Image (cartoon, rainbow, N blue to C red):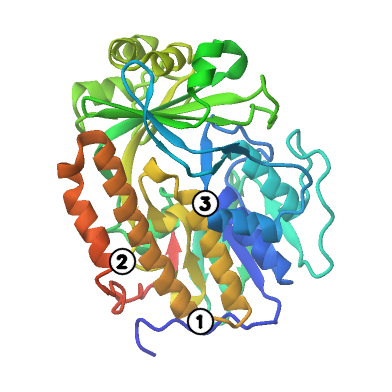
């Protein structure tokens, strides 16, 4: 067998034992699709908590995610707020440009708990009455506190070793393993040690403000997804559900993201990524741990440079957090001869400017459904998700650089995007060899 050719281990219409490493939204979407097809799906999550904080993170969805929810979400009630369009504000807070583009806005917590309700029937404050399983659903389990110690391809199945507790291990066998454990995936790192996160040269400050804490003037300025650009910075804001998932007026949150350039390893970067206990974080400084003295400087910038509505929400944010923006792209989405798949941000970490990550995971799940139905091969699935990951990277990088620095700085990314979309470029007609290893361990 050629090194690039995965085995045809997925047999349409024959139930499989599938293990997914990572129980966040990517793993849950894959798990829901696969259990709907009658497979037995076991998600193993490192966190020890079923109900999770929503991380104060907003999500803007796109058509593929909406399609996923329409096909696979059985929870009653709405899960999103709608924005009638997009606007760009000037220094006085007036709209200088508007776009009629309806969008759906939600939060990480709403989607996570809704997916859990659909996957394994978790009852939560977000979804107190989870739906019953569908008639043809396979078994769905969600294991907590599970850390992977190793994976081995036996030739007929995959053996996974978990360290479930200090001094104890458990062994699981599966027909197929899917990695959905995020950009810092240890397992992907073992298979592809050359793949690393690359810092983009700027950070994203994020935060939310309760609707009830804002003036009518500020709220009226943000009836649409709103942007404001200034001096190599830009900030955006949209409305998301409340911390308990409420969509009711007065209980919602105003979610903002501010992109700001900071050189890697500069004193300013180190200062803002150092928490109140003195620990320096590499990728994300969590909410409630930011040093107030370090944040005070950026609040001053907001007050001096931003238009009044944006300055107001930044000033009223009590628990901001910050993420170092980075890129990551894995060259293959299939390993171990086809018995292991790499998905979500473990496969492609794209910059968040266009909110493409959640929708990309939904599309990977919908495409995998076609593989299990015999409508496409796993080779076709891999080439499509890799190609779309590259398109997403070029698209979001062009948009983000344009917003930050202007059109001249975005020309290079835009040219690559045009070449990939219009120029008939086939970037993955020849894939690099699949890793030859049959086992990985810590």
User: Closer to the observer: label 3 or label 1?
Assistant: 3
What whole-number distance in Å separates the C-alpha atoms at marks 1 and 2?
23 Å
| Image point (70%, 27%), residue name | 248
Q: Is residue 176 above or below residue 104?
A: below
What whole-number distance in Å separates the C-alpha atoms at marks 3 and 1?
25 Å
| Image point (51%, 42%), residue name | 60
Residue 317 relative to residue 25: left or right: left
Give the image location of residue 84, x and y in percent.
Answer: 54, 38
Instruction: Choose top left, top right, bottom left or bottom right for residue 97.
Output: top left
What whole-number distance in Å separates the C-alpha atoms at marks 3 and 2?
19 Å
Quadrant the C terminus occupies: bottom left
Disc marking residue 421: 2
Q: Is residue 120 above or below residue 245?
A: below
Q: Residues within 10 Å of mark 3 (few under 14, many from 20)?
A: some
Q: Is residue 428 above or below residue 330?
A: below
Q: Earlier in the sequence, mark 3 or mark 2?
A: 3
Residue 297 relative to residue 380: left or right: left
Disc marking residue 205: none
Label 1, secondary structure: give it. loop
Q: Name the residue nearer the viewer: 171 or 254.
A: 254
Tell how many labels. 3
Give the image location of residue 284, x and y in percent.
Answer: 40, 33
Label 3, secondary structure: give it. loop
Instruction: Choose top left, top right, bottom left or bottom right for residue 65.
Output: bottom right
Quadrant the N terminus occupies: bottom left
Label 3, on which residue? 62
Disc marking residue 377: 1
């Amino acid at each position: 067998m050629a090194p690039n050719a995965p085995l045809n281990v997925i047999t349409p219409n024959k139930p499989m034992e599938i293990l997914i490493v990572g129980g966040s939204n990517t793993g849950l979407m894959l798990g829901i699709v696969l259990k709907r097809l009658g497979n037995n799906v076991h998600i193993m999550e490192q966190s020890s908590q079923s109900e999770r904080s929503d991380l104060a993170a907003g999500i803007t969805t796109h058509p593929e995610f909406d399609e996923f929810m329409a096909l696979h979400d059985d929870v009653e009630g709405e899960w999103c707020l709608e924005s009638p369009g997009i606007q760009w504000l000037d220094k006085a807070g007036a709209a200088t440009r508007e776009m009629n583009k309806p969008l759906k806005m939600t939060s990480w917590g709403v989607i996570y708990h809704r997916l859990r309700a659909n996957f394994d029937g978790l009852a939560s404050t977000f979804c107190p009455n989870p739906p019953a399983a569908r008639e043809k659903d396979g078994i769905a389990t969600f294991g907590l506190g599970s850390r992977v110690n190793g994976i081995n391809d036996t030739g007929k199945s995959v053996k996974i070793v978990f360290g479930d507790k200090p001094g104890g291990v458990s062994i699981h066998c599966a027909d197929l393993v899917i990695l959905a454990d995020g950009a810092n995936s240890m397992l992907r790192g073992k298979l592809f040690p050359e793949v690393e996160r690359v810092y983009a040269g700027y950070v994203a400050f994020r935060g939310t403000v309760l609707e009830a804490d804002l003036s009518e003037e500020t709220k009226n300025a943000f009836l649409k997804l709103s942007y404001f650009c200034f001096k190599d910075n830009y900030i955006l804001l949209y409305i998301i559900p409340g911390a308990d998932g409420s969509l009711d007026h007065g209980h919602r949150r105003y979610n903002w993201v501010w992109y700001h350039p900071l050189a890697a390893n500069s004193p300013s970067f180190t200062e803002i990524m150092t928490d109140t206990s003195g620990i320096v974080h590499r990728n994300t400084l969590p909410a409630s741990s930011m040093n107030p003295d370090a944040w005070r400087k950026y609040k001053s910038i907001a007050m001096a440079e931003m238009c009044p509505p944006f300055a107001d929400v930044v000033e009223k944010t009590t628990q901001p957090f910050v993420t170092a923006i980075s890129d990551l792209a894995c060259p293959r989405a299939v390993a171990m001869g086809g018995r292991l798949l790499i998905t979500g941000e473990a496969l492609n970490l794209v910059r968040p400017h266009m909110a493409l990550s959640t929708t990309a995971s939904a599309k990977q799940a919908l495409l995998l459904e076609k593989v299990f139905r015999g409508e496409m091969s796993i080779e076709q699935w891999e080439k499509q998700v890799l190609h779309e990951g590259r398109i997403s990277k070029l698209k979001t990088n062009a948009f983000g650089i344009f917003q930050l620095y202007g059109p001249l700085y975005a020309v290079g990314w835009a040219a690559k995007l045009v070449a990939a979309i219009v120029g008939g470029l086939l970037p993955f007609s020849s894939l690099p060899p699949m890793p030859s290893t049959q086992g990985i361990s810590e």
